[in-house]
Amino acid sequence: MKLAATRGLSVLGVTDHNTTAGVDGAERTARERGIEIVPGVELSTSYKGSSVHVLCYWMDRENQDFQAELERLRADRFLRGRRMVEKLQTLGYPISFERVQDIASGGNIVRPHVAQALVEAGVVETEEDAFTPELIADGGRADVPKHALHPFDAMELIERAGGVCVLAHPGMWSGQDTVPGDLIEAMAERGMAGLEADHPDHTPEQRERYRVVASALGLVATGSSDCHGTRYDPVRLGTVTTDPLQFAALRDRAVRVR
């Protein structure tokens, strides 16, 4: 929150993967610095065997069905992480699950934590280098299938919890150029509120393309730095933002849903 304040951010979305545990603390700390927190979560879903990340904003954090699904996702990630480490150890790579847990700081375990352990062990130079068929890419030798909702099921869960849905970084999908257009259109028809057009890993051409898609489908075009803390050097908090008018439109959608 101190960094957000120094970078001139007045609104900050908190969307941890499959947990809302950090939102309360973020709100308390942000209040001291005059920053508004948009409570959220990033849900892991699957479409045609590949990950699709779905963002949820302004949901009822006390909704029991919503929290039960988040707990199920977290439990699956814990077991998945342990099995991935076991596979890597069998393949001869010197990492431990204890170190992966330390990297995750006792929280949700996801593949980048395993990737960081591989970097520390000298197996690969960067986290991105771990996402190969030899290691932990989708379908890789050490990959483990995970429990994941279909995007439509995630949307239904979000709707029941009174939140609004935004498709995260559509330009990052299974090594392909984009999340399939038919899925984006189908999600828009089912009530999706927004499309994350501006993202650090989107090219300028992709950003413009998704703004056009959002406009054509009546979606809010959002932006995000997708900051994962010190995983990136320098920390990229606030390097990409949502246009204030688009943010106001997204908030209006949330108010109507609630």
Image: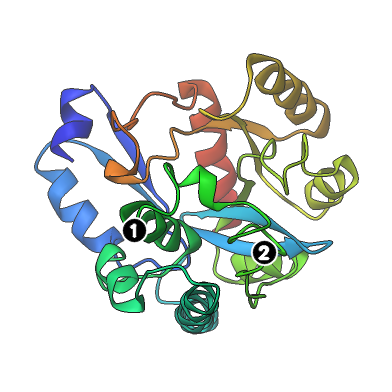
Q: Which of the 4 image quadrants contains residue 144?
A: bottom right
Q: Nearer the viewer, residue 100 or 212?
A: 100
- Residue 72, which numbered label? none
Foreground tag (2 vs 1):
1
Does 221 sit above or below residue 251?
above
**Mark 1 residue type:** Ala
Question: Measured from the top left, where is residue 193 in percent x and y?
Answer: 66, 44
Does 166 sit above or below residue 102?
above
Which of the marked residues, 2 or 1, is nearer the chain's N terminus? Answer: 2
Please identify the quadrant where the N terminus is shown: top left
Give the residue at x 59% y 44%: 253
Does 76 sit above or below residue 14?
below
| SS of the residue under disc 1 | loop
Exactly how many numbered labels are in the figure?
2
- Residue 45, which numbered label? 2
Does 14 sit above or below residue 235?
below
Q: Nearer the viewer, residue 235 or 40?
A: 235
Q: Which residue is mark 1?
A: 121
Question: Measured from the top left, where is residue 231 in percent x and y?
Answer: 33, 44
| SS of the residue under disc 2 | strand
Give the residue at x 55% y 69%: 161
**Mark 2 residue type:** Thr
For the residues marked 2 and 1, what is the alpha-carbon distance in whole angstroms? 30 Å
Q: Is 212 displayed left or right of 146 in the figure?
A: right
